[in-house]
Image (cartoon, rainbow, N blue to C red):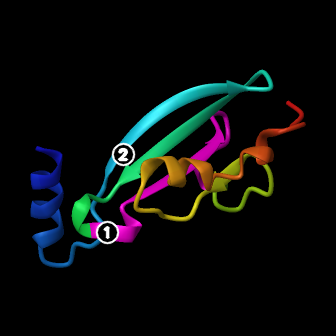
Amino acid sequence: MDDEVLAYLNSRQGADEASRVSTYRVWIHSRDVTVEVYDHGPSADALRYSVAAYLSDLPESDRNAATRGYSLGNPEPRLRDALSNVHWWEFDNIEE
């Protein structure tokens, strides 16, 4: 079903890069981290999966500008590789 929805959304005029987003939470060094997995569908080939991880209390407006507590990994054709691309060390030694 997801692939059908993505194909439909991407076929709409003016639409590009539709994706299914799955959200997870993990505690890293006693800090709550949100992990978003983007699946652009099989037609995206090498760019199918990408992953963003950020401190859960980091305001959305600050995420892309954050120097610590936010990481967006490069897209990959395999989910495991996309997860590995996240700079997990960004969450080491972050003070509250």
Q: Tell me: residue 62, above or below residue 44.
A: above
Which of the image's four quarters has the N terminus?
top left
* Residue name at image x 64 percent, y 60 percent: 64
* Residue name at image x 13 percent, y 77 percent: 13
Q: Which residue is mark 2?
A: 21
Which of the image's four quarters has the C terminus?
top right
* Residue name at image x 31 percent, y 68 percent: 45
Q: Which residues are magenta?
A: 44-61
Judge from the rendering whether residue 35 lies leftward or rightward of residue 43; answer left or right.
Answer: right
Judge from the rendering whether residue 90 lies leftward or rightward of residue 22; answer left or right.
Answer: right
Q: Was residue 56 drawn as part of the magenta stretch in this picture?
A: yes
The picture places residue 94, in percent across and down from the top left corner, at 86, 37
User: Dot 1 lies on which element?
Assistant: helix
The picture places residue 6, in percent across and down from the top left corner, at 18, 57
Q: What's under tag 2, amino acid-wise?
A: Val
Density class for disc 2 (Cα within 10 Å; few <14, some 14-19, many ≥20) is: some
Q: For residue 10, what is the image quadrant? A: bottom left
Q: Earlier in the sequence, mark 2 or mark 1?
A: 2
Q: What's under tag 1, amino acid-wise?
A: Asp
Q: Which residue is mark 1?
A: 45
